[in-house]
Image (cartoon, rainbow, N blue to C red):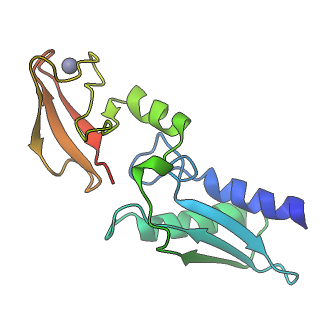
Amino acid sequence: MTATRADAAAIAGAVPDPELRVVTIGELGIVRGAEQAEDGHVVVTITPTYSGCPAMDAIRDDIRSALAAAGYADVEVKTVLSPAWSTDMITESGWAALERTGIAAPGPSGTPTCPRCGHQGRPTPVLQISRYASTPCQSLWSCRSCLEPFNAIKKL
Ligand SMILES: [Zn+2]
């Protein structure tokens, strides 16, 4: 049943993030894996991104429906908190998809690069306007070069 196990993990990983629709929960590093028992019972393991992320219930439901649509009737979604999720778990294709929609990576120092003009905060800085943007996992920034506001994923 090795192939089936890989399939269940791949199907779960291909579920789009309910808030950041352009990336999958696999690309965000939320899906840790999937195990299928002899009796067909599937356990998908996920790690929440930010504590209290309101999207986690939606993610659990979406995983169950995606697997049900693929013929997995008996699915359990288990949350593991350790090792804790960090922005390092977002894949390269995940960052690329986010940047294409104007959401910046936090950058090594926690100061993002403007996704619109590529401005990196020197000599004029990019300024944080708000610690919270459209979702709790993003903050709102203003670029002093192109003067456009943009969202960035918070570094964790
Ligand atoms: Zn800019």
x and y percentages locating residue 18 in the rendered image = 44, 54
Q: Is residue 70 above or below residue 45?
A: above
Q: Say above or below: 67 vs 10.
A: below
Left/right of residue 19 with respect to residue 114 in the rendered view: right
Which quadrant of the rendered structure holds the C terminus? bottom left
Tally the marks: 0
| Residue under the image location 44 percent in, 71 percent down | 57
User: Which residue occupies the extreme right position in the image?
Assistant: 1
Residue 53 in which image quadrant: bottom left
In the picture provided, is 60 more to the left or to the right than 40?
A: left
Image quadrant where one finds the N terminus: bottom right
- Determine whether 3 is above or below 98 in the image: below
Q: Is residue 142 left or right of residue 102?
A: left
Which residue extends farthest front? 109
Residue 39 position within the rendered picture, expressed as x and y whole percent measured from the top left: 86, 84
Name the residue located 47 percent from the left edge and 30 percent from the top edge: 96
Of 72 and 41, nearer the camera is 41
Q: Position of residue 70 (x, y in %)?
A: 76, 60
Ligand 1's image quarter is top left
